[in-house]
Every structure is written in C-alpha cells, then in structure tokens.
Image (tube, helix red, strand yellow):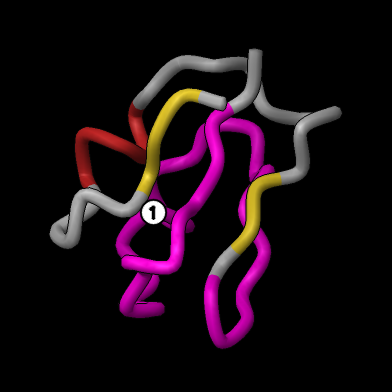
Amino acid sequence: MAHIITDDCIACGTCISECPVEAISEGDIYSINADLCIDCGTCAEACPSEAIKPA
C-alpha cells in the first residue's frame, strides 16, 4: 500500500530527497506515485508537517 500526501503539505522538498525509489513529484502539493512507492515510510518520517500518511 502506498503512502499519500495530504493537503497539509508545505512543499518544502524534504520528502523528495528521502525517497529511495524517487516516487515523489513536486507541485503545489507534492504527490506520490503509487506504482513506484514501496511503502517504506521514510518520507513520512522526514516530513516536518506530518502531511504523509498511509493510504
């Protein structure tokens, strides 16, 4: 199951550098490609706004 990025995202970019499979895309609110996400949770641990949750 992939993680999702909620509306709490502040687009700081912290999660992008933490993702080992480059599943996160930039935008006003970042998004996670569910097909690439390996559900490791590294991005969620790094997120300062706690915007990344299990789907």
35 vs 50: above or below: above
The quadrant holding residue 17 is bottom left
Specify the amino acid type for callout 1: Cys
Magenta stretch contains residue 28: yes
Side of 35 where 45 appears, left or right: left
Label 1 sits on residue = 15
Magenta stretch contains residue 16: yes
Specify the quadrant that holds the N terminus.
Answer: top right
Report the front residue among 20 and 54.
54
**Residue depicted at x 62% and y 82%:** 27
Q: Locate residue 23, reporting x and y percent.
A: 68, 43
**Residue depicted at x 56% and y 87%:** 28
49 vs 44: above or below: below
Residue extending furthest toward the left: 48
Side of 51 where 25 appears, left or right: right
**Residue depicted at x 64% and y 58%:** 31
Kindly state the secondary structure of the residue where label 1 is placed.
helix
The quadrant holding residue 45 is top left
Side of 44 where 35 appears, left or right: right
**Residue depicted at x 67% and y 27%:** 37
Residue extending furthest toward the right: 35
The quadrant holding residue 36 is top right
Specify the quadrant that holds the C terminus.
Answer: top right
Q: Locate residue 6, reporting x and y percent.
A: 45, 56
14 vs 51: above or below: below
Q: Locate residue 43, reporting x and y percent.
A: 37, 39
The span shown in magenta is 3-29
Report the front residue among 14 and 4.
4
Q: Locate residue 19, reporting x and y percent.
A: 49, 40
